[in-house]
Image (cartoon, coloured by chain):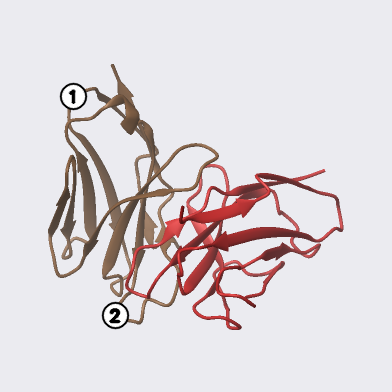
Amino acid sequence: DGGITQSPKYLFRKEGQNVTLSCEQNLNHDAMYWYRQDPGQGLRLIYYSQIVNDFQKGDIAEGYSVSREKKESFPLTVTSAQKNPTAFYLCASRRGLKETQYFGPGTRLLVL
Amino acid sequence: DQQVKQNSPSLSVQEGRISILNCDYTNSMFDYFLWYKKYPAEGPTFLISISSIKDKNEDGRFTVFLNKSAKHLSLHIVPSQPGDSAVYFCAASSQSGGGADGLTFGKGTHLIIQP
């Protein structure tokens, strides 16, 4: 059963703590993306990666970091430098640059 | 500066009628447009897309129209069904530029289908 999985569904972060959100896909897609959604807002691009070991900043990369060591995996770390981390985080992937992006189910991050 | 705008935060339509959701864009480099449907606490689901070389694309009850000169696109749902109640996002990208960047999204329109 192919798809994009994100874990955990809910994540709590304490002040000053780094947390990592997982995104895995078994669709053999080359490109992967991280978006953030705030209430009443559209999705905004954080980071994206077209190939393994390469990634680019999106519109709101400050306070976040990523890695792409495997084609299937694109974890996002929310660092303590991100002052407003509470949001719904969505991972997406697509096979080629001219293909449609498909999304995972999302992770909601809350600050304690 | 919002490059993709959905000016109606919500829209209420009677079941069986046509739902028309609108989207405007400002970036002339956009040449590929998509509509996604989203339920609360879930990821967006792809509905339909259109390339700038076309002005219409149809898939079942869903039709997207593109007016390049007006930088406007719309999604028509006919007939509207209760399961269509969700938030609809318009998104755009520049494929001629390689399509490497992610999508640019509007803020969404909450469609409510009334029985």
- Say which quadrant the C terminus of chain B sits in: top left
- The subunit letter for the residue under badge 1 reads B
Name the amino acid type tagged 1.
Answer: Gly
Picture coordinates of residue A30 (x, y %)?
Answer: 46, 75
Chain identifier matching the brown colour in the rendered picture: B
The answer to which image quadrant residue A74 occupies is bottom right
> Front-most of B79 and B91?
B79
Q: Residues within 10 Å of mark 1 (few under 14, many from 20)?
A: some
Q: Which residue occupies 19% across, 68% down?
A: B52
Picture coordinates of residue A78 (x, y %)?
Answer: 73, 61
Picture coordinates of residue B98 (x, y %)?
Answer: 36, 81
Chain identifier matching the red colour in the rendered picture: A
First-in-chain label (2 vs 1): 1
Q: Is residue A3 left or right of residue B86?
A: right
Q: For mark 1, what is the residue?
A: B16
Name the element at disc 2. loop
Total numbered labels placed on residues in the image: 2
- The subunit letter for the residue under badge 2 reads B
From the viewer's perspective, is residue A39 above or below residue B115?
A: below
> Front-most of B107 and A91?
A91
- Say which quadrant the N terminus of chain B sits in: bottom left
Question: In the displayed image of the protein, which residue is found farthest to the left?
Answer: B55
Q: Is residue A61 left or right of residue A94?
A: right
Q: Which mark is residue B96?
A: 2
Q: How far is disc 2 from disc 1 in space, using C-alphas?
A: 38 Å
